[in-house]
């Protein structure tokens, strides 16, 4: 059945009430039934929940074939936890038919590709999938289609019981002996633990894995002992160098700076750019640089930003310290400055992924957001964005909070160069729709700005401010005139990944790649 | 193949951005930043044994990239090198809007280039006289001969001073006050204005010194320069902003041109606008202000 972004969703996926994407805010006002986990009671006072090894923790939690294990991605590309747990489960306990439900996965998890090829891991539910894992899934080697969800869609699915977590594994920078855990204070610090919070509340069992045991009570705890079954101390939960990068330098690339300034010009031309406005930006070059120009425009207008959310980086922490933003609410930290600031700098708070972006709850921050600045691998003339599949059709990205913030915000600005190498970023049809075009408002490229015709109000704002803009079709034609018009990527029929919209409807599917032949 | 329209001898040239003609990543779309002119360099930026490669890169850029309304000028190698004739051929064959003569010291230098351009234009079937010239004065001798240089060719739209070489010849160095270049800038401006051509200032090389850059811009604006050579896109906006007329200047110019046209229709020669006496001599200046204002997005009327 064709959905609202024109993608053909196979009927066999539309079982048990699953629907195709119907357009933004389709589920508004509907009721949902939340599920509760089946948890073990710990009435007898216990001194400690420490167990010696991950294998012991698995046994204690009754790990068996066919279970779903969950993980967070706060340790990013430095993460050791997923690989350690899966090795213990499969190589030591001999388990099989396992599903990994992670908030995201990266190239740190390349070894999991072997377990997929061996048929030991049969399901993947994640926001991001990259590296060898993306390759083997795209080659059709995972037994069931991977399910790709946004950062807000994931807690929605967990709360609704669409994914049932048997054991949640929480890598924590520090923990005490009963499982009060934080992302700071240890040797592998990641700052916020927002993506693990819903897991801890809804999983049947929770195992904390840390490399820094601290005195009880470890407060304020991101993950509370009341939800934790076992604590394992390991040598290292991750490579600190890859967990939080040293602060990324603001780009000196003139192209990125130009786009960043155009983004801020667009933002400043709208009526939402007023005292108390809210803002989120990513960690890419132009997005980071936008912070710099934003400060200038804030000063010129004599206003302040009310609050900022998201993955947080140094420029936002600096704005907070200078008093130019009222509050920073943080689900994840991208660099050491942000890690060292959370819960330390006044008005820098932590939140859960559900509070951040879950569209099915009653107060997600994304739905109060004025502006979000996002990147794209591809954007088509319907303003649909792809941040998941490469130009070869292989899984190599992550929707992350992209669809959530785009849908929730008043103004969603996509910033991307028109072409990357020989690839047209602005194209006729994206390979995979990860953020639907009805949620995307403005596109800023190095060759010009385009406004979604669904937003005549913004077109008027740009015209009033004297900001030139063109149609997205003309940008696409410009891109094709430079790099040529590509042939469509060829796929087999088999669906290897299902892409859920933030509301749980099906936005698109990714099919098995066809080996390239001339 | 891209056919560029016939170059306009006197057009808006606030910024001329230099870039190495051998670097595809730079020249493939340098127009997106919005400098008025780009200056593709075959001279100092290109190593001696890479001159041929740079010419190929330049030719393909000129013939395949649509630079739109951005003027495309090529800085060719000096007359004391074995490269300049071939440089001229490639510029004309590729359809560059103009060429920049490095280290120009005399009217004869300009005439030599003019003749070579004519020859190349005939060779490649290009309209004779199409290719414009800007002469770079880089030595005391060039500055002293500025007026004869400025008058040497109908192709010549302007002269530019080149600070690096000039300061070396003068045994001085950059000074934030501008004293190091004051006499040369002044003499060149006098010559250019006397000859009725444009005049451009040298590059400012410290990209991190925003204040110094602005101070220099204020000085050259006060002196009367048309524009400035730049080396990085981030310099475009400060130049365009600082060389732009003020809102008040634009309003006054608009009032003057309007009043003049009404007065002329009524047969009146001298009149006042906002208390200031105005006659025909003020009008080209006022029109120039309006043109500049239009280019800067400050004026949307139809007087110019």
Image (tube, coloured by chain):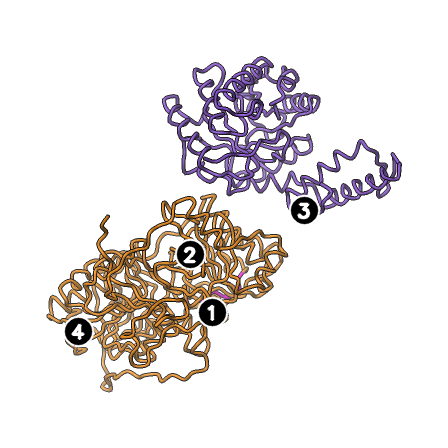
Label 1 to label 3, Cα distance in Å?
A: 36 Å
Q: Is residue A222 visible?
A: no
| Labelled pair 1, 4 in contact (Cβ < 8 Å) | no
- Which quadrant holds the N terminus of chain A? bottom left
Residues marked 1 and 2, same chain: yes
Query: What is the quadrant of residue A74 in the picture?
Result: bottom left
Q: Secondary structure at mark 2?
A: loop
Query: Marks 2 and 4, Cα distance to the nearest angstrom?
Result: 39 Å
**Distance between the Cα atoms at labels 1 and 2?**
16 Å
Residue under label 1, please give it.
A408
Instruction: Name the tint of chain B in the rendering.
Output: purple
As measured in the structure, the alpha-carbon distance from the residue carrying label 4 to the one carrying label 3 is 70 Å
Residue depicted at x 75% and y 33%: B284
Q: Which label's residue is closer to the chain start, 1 or 4?
A: 4
Q: Position of residue B129 (x, y in %)?
A: 58, 23
Dot 3 corresponds to which residue? B298
Magenta-highlighted residues: A325-329
Q: Position of residue A128 (x, y in %)?
A: 31, 62
Graded by Cα atoms within 10 Å as few (under 14), some (14 to 19) or many (20 or more), the crowding at tag 3 reads some
What is the C-alpha distance between the residues marked 1 and 4? 39 Å
> With respect to residue A219, does A266 lie above or below?
above
Q: Is residue A61 magenta?
A: no
Q: Colour of chain A?
A: orange
The residue under label 2 is A375
């Amino acid at each position: 059945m064709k959905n609202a972004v024109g993608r053909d969703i196979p009927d066999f996926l539309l079982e048990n009430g699953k629907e195709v994407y119907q357009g933004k805010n389709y589920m508004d006002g509907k009721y949902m039934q939340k599920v509760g986990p089946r948890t073990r009671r710990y009435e007898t006072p216990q001194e400690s929940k420490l167990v010696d090894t991950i294998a012991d923790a698995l046994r204690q939690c009754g790990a068996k074939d066919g279970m779903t294990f969950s993980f967070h991605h706060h340790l990013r590309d430095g993460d050791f936890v997923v690989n350690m747990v899966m090795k213990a489960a499969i190589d030591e306990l001999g388990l099989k038919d396992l599903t990994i439900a992670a908030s995201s996965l990266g190239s740190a998890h390349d070894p999991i590709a072997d377990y997929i090829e061996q048929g030991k891991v049969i399901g993947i539910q994640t926001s991001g999938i990259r590296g060898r894992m993306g390759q083997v899934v795209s080659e059709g080697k995972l037994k069931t289609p991977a399910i790709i969800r946004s950062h807000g869609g994931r807690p929605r699915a967990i709360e609704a019981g669409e994914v049932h977590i048997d054991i949640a594994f929480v890598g924590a920078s520090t923990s005490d002996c009963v499982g009060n855990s934080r992302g700071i204070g240890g040797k592998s610090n990641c700052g916020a633990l927002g993506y693990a919070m819903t897991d801890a509340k809804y999983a049947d069992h929770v195992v904390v894995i840390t490399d820094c045991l601290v005195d009880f009570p470890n407060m304020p705890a991101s993950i509370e002992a009341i939800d934790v079954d076992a604590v394992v101390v390991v040598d290292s939960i991750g490579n600190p160098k890859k967990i939080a990068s040293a602060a990324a330098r603001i780009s000196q690339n003139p192209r990125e700076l130009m786009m960043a300034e155009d983004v801020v010009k667009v933002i400043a031309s709208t009526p939402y750019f007023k005292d108390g406005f809210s803002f989120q930006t990513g960690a890419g070059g132009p997005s980071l640089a936008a912070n710099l120009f934003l400060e200038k425009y804030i000063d010129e207008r004599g206003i302040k930003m009310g609050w900022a959310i998201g993955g947080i980086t140094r420029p936002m922490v600096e704005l907070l310290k200078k008093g130019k933003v009222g509050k920073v609410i943080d689900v994840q930290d991208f660099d050491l400055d942000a890690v060292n600031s959370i819960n330390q700098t006044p008005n820098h708070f932590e939140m859960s992924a559900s509070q951040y972006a879950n569209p099915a709850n009653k107060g997600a921050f994304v739905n109060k957001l004025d502006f979000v600045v996002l990147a794209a691998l591809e954007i088509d003339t319907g303003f649909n964005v792809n941040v998941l599949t490469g130009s070869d059709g292989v899984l190599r990205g992550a929707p992350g909070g992209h669809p959530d913030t785009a849908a929730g915000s008043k103004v969603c600005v996509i910033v991307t160069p028109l072409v990357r190498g020989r690839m047209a970023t602005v194209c006729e049809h994206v390979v995979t729709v990860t953020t639907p075009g009805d949620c995307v408002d403005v596109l800023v490229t190095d060759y010009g700005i385009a406004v979604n015709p669904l937003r005549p109000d913004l077109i008027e704002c740009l015209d009033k401010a004297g900001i030139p803009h063109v149609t997205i079709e003309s940008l696409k034609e410009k891109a094709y005139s430079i790099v040529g018009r590509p042939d469509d990527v060829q796929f087999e029929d088999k669906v290897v990944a299902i892409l859920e919209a933030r509301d749980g409807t099906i936005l698109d599917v990714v099919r098995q790649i066809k080996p390239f032949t001339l | 193949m891209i056919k560029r329209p016939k170059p306009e001898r006197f057009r808006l040239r606030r910024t001329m951005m230099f870039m190495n003609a051998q670097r595809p990543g730079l020249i493939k779309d340098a127009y997106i930043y919005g400098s008025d002119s780009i200056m593709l360099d075959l001279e100092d930026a290109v190593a001696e044994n890479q001159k041929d490669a740079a010419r190929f890169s330049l030719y393909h850029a000129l013939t395949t990239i649509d630079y739109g309304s951005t003027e495309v000028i090529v800085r060719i190698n000096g007359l004391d090198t074995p490269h300049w004739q071939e440089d001229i051929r490639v510029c004309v064959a590729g359809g560059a809007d103009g060429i920049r003569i490095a280290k120009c010291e005399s009217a004869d230098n300009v005439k030599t280039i003019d003749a070579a351009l004519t020859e190349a234009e005939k060779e490649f079937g290009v309209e004779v006289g199409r290719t414009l010239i800007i002469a770079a004065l880089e030595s005391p001798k060039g500055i002293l001969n500025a007026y004869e240089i400025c008058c040497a060719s109908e192709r010549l739209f302007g002269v530019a001073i080149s600070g690096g070489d000039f300061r070396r010849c003068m045994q001085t160095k950059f000074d934030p006050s501008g004293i190091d270049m004051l006499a040369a800038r002044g003499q060149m401006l006098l010559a250019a204005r006397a000859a009725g051509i444009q005049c451009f200032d040298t590059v400012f090389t410290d990209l991190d010194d925003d204040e110094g850059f602005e101070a220099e811009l204020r000085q050259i604006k006060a002196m009367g320069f048309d524009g400035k050579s730049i080396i990085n896109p981030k310099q475009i906006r400060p130049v365009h902003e600082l060389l732009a007329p003020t809102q008040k200047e634009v309003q006054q110019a608009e009032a003057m041109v309007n009043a003049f046209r009404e007065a002329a229709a009524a047969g009146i020669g001298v009149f006042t606008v906002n208390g200031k006496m105005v006659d025909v001599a003020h009008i080209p200046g006022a029109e120039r202000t309006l043109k500049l204002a239009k280019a800067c997005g400050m004026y949307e009327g139809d007087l110019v």
